[in-house]
Image (tube, grey):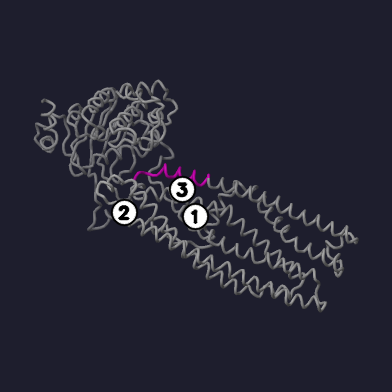
Amino acid sequence: MAEQHEDEIVGKVYDARLIRRLLTYLRPYRLQTSLALAAIVLKAGADVLGPYLTKVAIDKYLTQSADGHGWIESRLSAAPLVGIGQVAVLFIGSLLVSFVFEFIQMYLMQWVGQKVMFDLRRELFRLLQAMHIGFYDKNPVGRLVTRVTSDVDALNEMFTSGVVAIFEDVFVLAGIIAIMLKMNWWLALITFAVLPFIVYATKLFRDRVRDSYRRIRSAVAKINAYLSEHVSGMVVLQLFNREQRAYEKFEEINTLHMDAFKDAIMAHAVYYPVVEVLSAIAMASVIWFGGGAVMRGVTTLGVLVAFMQYAQRFFRPIMDLSEKYNILQSAMAASERVFKLADTPVEVVSPAQHIVPPGSGRIEFEHVWFTYASASAAAAAAAAVSAEPEWVLRDVSFTIEPGETVAIVGHTGAGKTTIISLLLRFYDVQRGGIKMDGVDLREMDLPTLRRRFGVVLQDPFLFSGTIEQNIRLGTDWITDEQVERAAEEVNVADFIRTLPQGFREPVNERGTTLSTGQKQLISFARALAHDPKILVLDEATSSVDTETELRVRAALTKLVSGRTSIIIAHRLSTIQRADKIIVMHHGQVREVGSHQSLLAQRGIYWKLYQLQYKDQEISTVA
């Protein structure tokens, strides 16, 4: 619902705070922006010159009724044919000048818009990379993708079309008004008489379109969310024969989008003819009153013809301004959402002055308390008399020596994976501390800390690219020989070489063309190729078949050799090899020891063994 609410934000047409912040992105491109603005002003001047030249040609040469005291008239030849030729040259010159300056401003503003989009997207992506994992627990991926794509596109449209067009329209209107008032003020007032009606029609149009566009954005967000969810869950949809039900629901959402668009179309279909009718009334009034004035000799024919042309040009920018209003409004709403994301604080950061642990990786958990609630919420709950945060870990303390293989076991929800997340500093603890060689993890540089670890997760993730790229994962110092050696050591090289392109075989999104076991083995090769000091296996063998597990088990023997290893597993064969087993229960460390010593205690581990592991041992013996 939060995402839907955000997508329904309408936004002000002009928000000084947001505009000032947006302008900061133009600072690196001040020169290009200044040149574009200058080109807009010069183009506006060239655009309003044409009707005036028509007036000069008619009054000075055709009817010979002008007084000739104007700046342009005084510099033209007195000979009619020569003078008309000069006017024609000036007219063509103004068109060429308008073309040149329009090209300059359009090219420069499009260039600046693309640069601003590039900078914004780069900034947002860097921010998303710096966010701790808890941020993604609360923010749907679809919303974040929309911020970096659609919302930034809306800002680009404002820079390249909205603001530029508004500036141009304002300058053109100002020029037309100034010339019309100077030529004949009472004819100008007759032309402007319909403006109140146009302003009122524009307000009605704006309100109607504003509501329609809000509904369109909301409907688009619903369509995207529904499509994403149901395409991802297509297997379940077809398995339970829910295609017709899903189709009907999608049709409802799609109808909302169509109805909103139809309302917007209706508003446009009514507004533009209304403005055309009002402008035609203004034109008819100019012809009626201006024509009478010409016949009475109060004004000249050239002034009347120029007024008719200016009247046609006067109402066109007004219609454009109403359209650009929607662009600005959409951009303000988009910028509000983008800056809300950009202002999200990064909770897990590297310290300004970090410490490099001197030893080989001794890990200590010292009275660690942790909850997935935010730090402020946890502090508020802890401070309350009757409230206490829902602690996932409670006073957890243990030590892992360098080179030791440690298994962490316990029921679902006991806090096993949370320990790994804290060790990699995806989250920060609320109480206590985690140390590596006596240095608190919060005092270490994040990239340096995570470079020490090689992690294989239960659900292996492969990126689009090739198998070789997924093993190397962009690490420059890993050679092709090391990639192949890592694949050999985890027993997946033979399979890779059977593929048409071997290690250069393309991998689809999330590795959909590979089996779970094959993806898992590639994940093992990735971890081995990076030569980590500490290996973390989080249920890494739970989703593979027996044959693959035997290959993984052989790979594990090579992986853990000479490394500190932390293993979360449900397979007895993996746990039995551990030097030490840590038993978690309801977020607490309840037992620590070897497999045999823990069985001898007949405690929680013994019960786990009876429930989960004994059958594995029997089947292994059989």
Picture coordinates of residue 379, whole percent (x, y): 30, 52
Q: Is there any visible trace of residue 359 in the rendered image?
A: no
Q: Residue at x 16, y 29 (%)?
A: 594
Indicate the amino acid at tag 2.
Ala
**Mark 3 or mark 2, which has the lower sequence index?**
3
Is residue 599 shown in magenta?
Answer: no
Give the left or right position of residue 598, taking residue 238 as reference.
Answer: left
Describe the element under mark 3 as helix, strand or loop.
helix
Look at mark 2 in the image and give the residue it sits on: 246
Predominant SS along the magenta part: helix
How far across and down, in percent of the image, does residue 282 sit? Answer: 67, 73
Residue name at image x 38 percent, y 47 percent: 141
Please, is residue 77 above or below residue 235 in the view? below
Q: Are marks 3 and 2 in contact (CB under 8 Å)?
A: no
Packing grade of label 2 (10 A; few <14, some 14-19, many >=20) is some
On the question of residue 164 being in view, the answer is yes
Vertical order, 281 against 126 (above or below):
below
Q: Which mark is residue 148?
A: 3
Q: Nearer the viewer, mark 2 or mark 1?
A: 2
Q: CA distance from mark 2 to mark 1?
A: 34 Å
**Which residue matches tag 1?**
335
What residue span does the magenta drawing correspond to? 118-133
Q: Are marks 1 and 3 in contact (CB under 8 Å)?
A: no
Which residue is farthest right?
79
Foreground disc of the pair 1, 3: 3
Q: Position of residue 312 (x, y in %)?
A: 68, 66
Q: In the image, 524: left or right of 301?
A: left
Amino acid type indicated by mark 3: Val
Q: Residue at x 33, y 53 (%)?
A: 376
